[in-house]
Every structure is written in structure tokens, then in C-alpha cells.
Amino acid sequence: MARLRQLIQHPWVLGLTGVLVVVLIWTVATSLKLVDPLFLPSPASVLAAGRSQAAQGLLWADLVASVGRVLGGFGLSAVVALPLGIAMGTSTVINRLLEPLMGLIRYMPAPAFIPLLIIYFGLGELPKILLIFIGTLFFNTLMIMDAVKFVPRELVETALTLGGRTSQVLLRVITPCIAPQVIDAYRINMAAAWNLVIVAELVAATERLGRRISLAQRFLRTDEIFLGLIVIGLIGLVIDLGFRLVMRRACAWAN
Amino acid sequence: MQLRVDQVDKSFGTGRTRKLVLDGISFSVNTGEFVALVGSSGSGKSTIMRLVAGLDRPSAGAISIDGSPVCGPGSDRGMVFQKYSLYPWLTAAQNVAFGMELQGLNRREIRERTSYFLEVVGLADAARRLPRELSGGMQQRVAIARALAAQPRVLLLDEPFGALDLQIRESMQEFMHDLWQHTGLTALLITHDLEEALLLAGQVHILAPNPGRIVRTVAVDLDRSDLRHLRVSREFLDLREELARSLRGLDPGLS
Ligand SMILES: Nc1ncnc2c1ncn2[C@@H]1O[C@H](COP(=O)(O)OP(=O)(O)O)[C@@H](O)[C@H]1O
Ligand SMILES: [Mg+2]
């Protein structure tokens, strides 16, 4: 009994159980033919689809392309959002100048920019990277700005009374102080970046994960749709865990 | 060194919401002196401290050190806040070293002075610990060491023990008194605790609220060879009672 409780308390156990239960229900439902296989392919056939795509080298190429777009667009957004968010959090002038604008743009759904981006930049890589950039920049910036506003005033003022200059306060007080929230903001908004890359690929790509799914739809290959979804979910999960790991390593003081 | 506060007024807000918080505050602190300002909460004590530290500007009057006006924060006036002022991502030693690093001292000097000041506050063993691993009293001692290590000409203490338990507060008062005797520092202490002011300071200014103004100044000449004994001595208790009565008389709401 005690060992069971200990097992359950391990952070991964219950989560894994949840996943396994769903897979089990899925397996049972498909093997009993409760649902038309056209709608709900069996785990085995999804696995087979994965194997065949992997064998043709499609899966890997799709992955690299989609991940590359996310990293490009989101990386750009992260790099721009950090100084911008810090500037908005520390300077009232910049804040008053930009906050209403950002609040407005933030509510424009990023996918609605796709037609414009296609008109401006065609169907290449650039419009997809820009879509991810636009779709995450404002959230990243505003979350970083909030983190800056919550830096305790005493921490900044202590640095000033110790002889610190403004640049030192920015680099040695504000930046380390907001690091945990910044990493967390990136982790959360990364999910949006993933959504956007798939949306962009569904609409406008000539290849890659999203495209694979829309192709599959055209040929009623639900197994490939499932495969696409699962792969996307897994990559997202890996990225999320990566961020958590960085957080645990770099910001041990904040836990 | 002489810190002079001369006919300082401070008001917050504009127009009809304008509120006078300090009215004609004057006092001075000379090298080696320990001066205290005592007042009830809301009487403008922290406001005075922020003006002296240069974190705020007076509405009228002048503050100067050795004749040169204070026009911003600087390392000649070290500040210890009531709480939350250690950098939580830095160890105790790194916190102590922080001001010296901002000032660009060379590494060897920083290392030596850091261990010296940790020793002075009795925390050599805690050098590698993070603030959250230290008790409230230890944290305040690190904050004091950090302020001292930056070599201020006057140490500004804004209710430094106000957040501590009674027992720890008493031992910190004893610690502060020893520190003053051994290092010959110059200090301006702000507190709502009359006992604390009388134990530590050679000169005590009593502040009346609404607007904050100095209504009485007492030179305290007591035998401080044993603070624990002093706390309960007739002479001390009489003085304390007399001043407490005049403090109560200032705030009709309380009596
Ligand atoms: N930045 C500010 N803006 C407006 N009012 C303030 C500000 N700082 C302090 N006050 C007011 O000044 C008065 C004195 O505050 P403070 O100096 O913090 O008192 P104390 O430290 O003695 O408790 C309070 O009534 C407070 O509301
Ligand atoms: Mg105060």
C-alpha cells in the first residue's frame, strides 16, 4: 500500500497512466470495430503509416522543416521581445507609446495575416517565419513587460544606492530577476508558435507536417492525419520539457 | 563628513489631491554619530530616508553632504531596506560583493572585503547560501554587510529590524550596537520603535505625523556597556515612558 502510494506520487506516473488509458481505449475501440476505421484508424495502422513515411524519409524532412520554421520565427520573436518588453516595463514613455498599439494588434488573430503575408512574400519560408513572429511577438513582449513591472522596487533601488548605473541595473538586476518569468513566457508562447506553423502549412505550404495532413485529408488517409497530430504533439512536449529543464538548471533560486 | 537636511518639505500629488507629507524637516548627522528618527507609521519616515538616499527629490529645502547637494542615489549613502532587498539569485557572498562589483573594484579586493564583511556580521559560514536559505535576521545582516562593503559615508537604515520577531530584533539591536562601536560607522536609523532608537542612537528626533515634522530632539546619554541590562534599567524606562507619552500626545487618534 505504502509502495503504491509512493509510486503514485512520482510526478510522471499518473501522467503516463492517463496517456496509456487513452491508448488502451483507442486500441480496444478499433479492434472491436466500434468505429469505422476510416474515421478512427487503429494504433497499429498509424504506426505503420509512420514507419512507411519514415522509410521514405518524408517524416524526417517534414519534421526538420517545421521545427526549423518554428525556431526561426519564434527565435526572432524572443530576441526582439526581450529588449522591447524590458523597455516597456522600465520606461513610462515607451510604455504609453506602445502598450495601446500592442493591445490592439494582439487581438488580431495571427492566421488572418496569412493572406497578406502570401501576397507580400509569396509561398516561401519568409511568410511562415513572419507569421510565427507576428503571432508570438506581442504575447512575449507583454509578458516580459509584466515581469519587469513586478521586479521589487527595493532590488532596483538597492543597486542604485550601491553606486549602480542604469545599464548595470538593467543587466545585473532586472534581467536576472525576470529570467524565470521570461523562460516561462517563452515556454507558454511556444505552443502558439507550433499552432501557427501548422496553420501556415495547412494553408500555404508545398510540403511539411501541416501539408502532409491536408494531403492526407484529400485522400481520406486518417491514419496519416493521426500520425501528423501525434508527431506534432510529441515535438511540442519535448520542447516544453526542454524549457522546464533550462528553467530548473538556470533558475534554481526561483523554485 | 556632515549630512545636512535643511528645511525640507515634501508633498505628493498635484492640485486638489496634493498632500504635504513632510514639513520643514531639519537635522544633521556627523561622522561617527548614530542618529535616529522615531515616528508612528505613516509619519513620513521612509519618505525622509528616500530623500536622503536621493531616490526622491524634496519639494523644498536642501539636502547636502559636506556642502555638496544630494541630487541622486550614490554609493556614499548606503541603504538597508526593511525587507526583500537581497538579490534572491545571488548567494550571501555574491550579495555582499555586488556593490563592489558595480563600482568596478578589482577581484582580489572584492574577495577579501567580502569575506571580511561576512566575518564582521558573523556569517562567514553562510557565504554560499542563497537568501531563501537564510533566516530573516541573517538576511538583514547580509544586507548590512553589503551596504558597508560599498564603503558608504553614512549608512541609512529604514526600519531594518521591523519585520523580525521580537527576540531576533533584540539580538539584532545588540549586533548593530557592537557593529557601530567596532567599525565607527555613521548611521541614520529610522524606526517606529522608541526603545530601539534609545538603545542605539546618540540623538533621537521625534516625528509627528500629518504632516511629518520634528517636534522634539533628545540627546541620549546612557551607559551602553550592557544593552540587555540597559533595556530594563530605571533610567532607560523612565526616559522611554516620558517620550512615549509625548509621542502618544501627538496622535490624538491613539490616546
Ligand atoms: N510615492 C508616494 N505617493 C503618494 N503618497 C506617498 C508616496 N510615498 C509616501 N506617501 C505618503 O506619505 C505618507 C508617509 O509615508 P511613509 O514615508 O512611507 O511613512 P512611514 O515610513 O513613516 O510609515 C503616507 O501617508 C503615504 O501614503
Ligand atoms: Mg516606512
Image (spheres, rainbow, N blue to C red):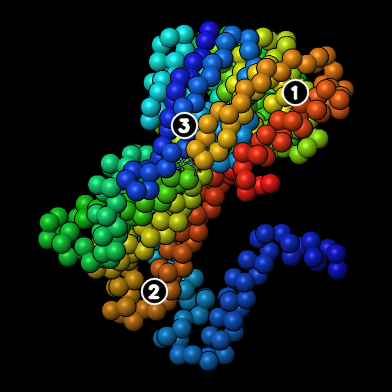
Residue to which mark 3 is pinned:
B23
Q: In the rendered image of this protein, does residue A36 appear above or below residue A153?
A: below
Q: Is residue B46 visible?
A: no
Looking at the rendered structure, the kind of residue marked 2 is Ile
At which x and y percent is residue A188? 45, 56
Say if disc 3 is inside 8 Å of ligand 1: no
Name the chain letter of the residue that bears numbered label 2: A
- x 79%, y 61%: residue: A6
| Quadrant location, the N terminus of chain A | bottom right
> Marks 2 and 1, Cα distance to the nearest angstrom?
77 Å
Vertical order, A103 against A91 (above or below): below
- Image coordinates of residue A145 in percent, x first then y, are 39, 46
Q: Mark 1 sits on what residue?
A: B199
> Mark number for residue A225?
2
What kind of element bears circle 2?
helix
In three-dimensional space, the C-alpha distance between marks 3 and 1, rounded to whole angstroms, equals 27 Å
- Frontmost residue, A5 versus A237: A5
Q: Is residue A151 visible?
A: yes
The amino acid beneath tag 1 is Leu
Q: Chain of mark 3?
A: B
Of tags 2 and 1, the one toward the viewer is: 1
